[in-house]
Image: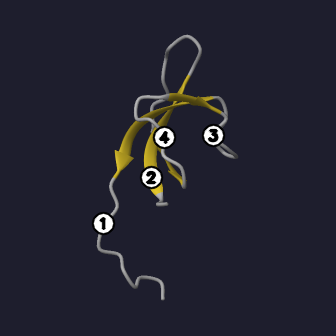
Amino acid sequence: MGIYTYKVLREYPDGSRAKRARTITRFQPLTVGGLYVRLGKGYPGMQRVMSEEKEPEDREGEGC
């Protein structure tokens, strides 16, 4: 189980998209390019997953 961070963009029913992407963090993987409805509080409507942001792999001992 890991933490996944994505950039999502609001998409409207007519196919147009918002100007700015937002970052969302999830414990479950999402499909890049997928269209999701109701991703949670603060992400209303349809959201298109644009990219996945990679985390540094060497994070052992952080937060201890």
Q: Earlier in the sequence, mark 1 or mark 2?
A: 2
- Looking at the rendered structure, the kind of residue marked 4 is Leu
Q: Which numbered dot is residue 30?
A: 4
Q: Position of residue 27 (x, y in %)?
A: 54, 55
- Local crowd at mark 4 within 10 Å, few (<14), some, or many (≥20)? some
Mark 1 closeness class: few <14, some 14–19, many ≥20 residues within 10 Å: few
- Residue that sits furthest to the front in the current view: 1
What amino acid type is highlighted by mark number 3? Answer: Leu
Please give the label number shown on residue 56. 1
- Where does label 2 land, which residue? 5
Vertical order, 29 against 57 (above or below): above
For the residues labelled 4 and 1, the Cα–Cα distance comes to 19 Å
Residue drawn at the location 45% of the way across and 52% of the way down: 5
Q: Mark 3 Cα within 10 Å, few/some/many (few <14, many 20+)?
A: few
Identified by mark 1, the residue type is: Pro
Look at mark 3 in the image and give the residue it sits on.
39
Quadrant of the rendered image containing residue 40: top right
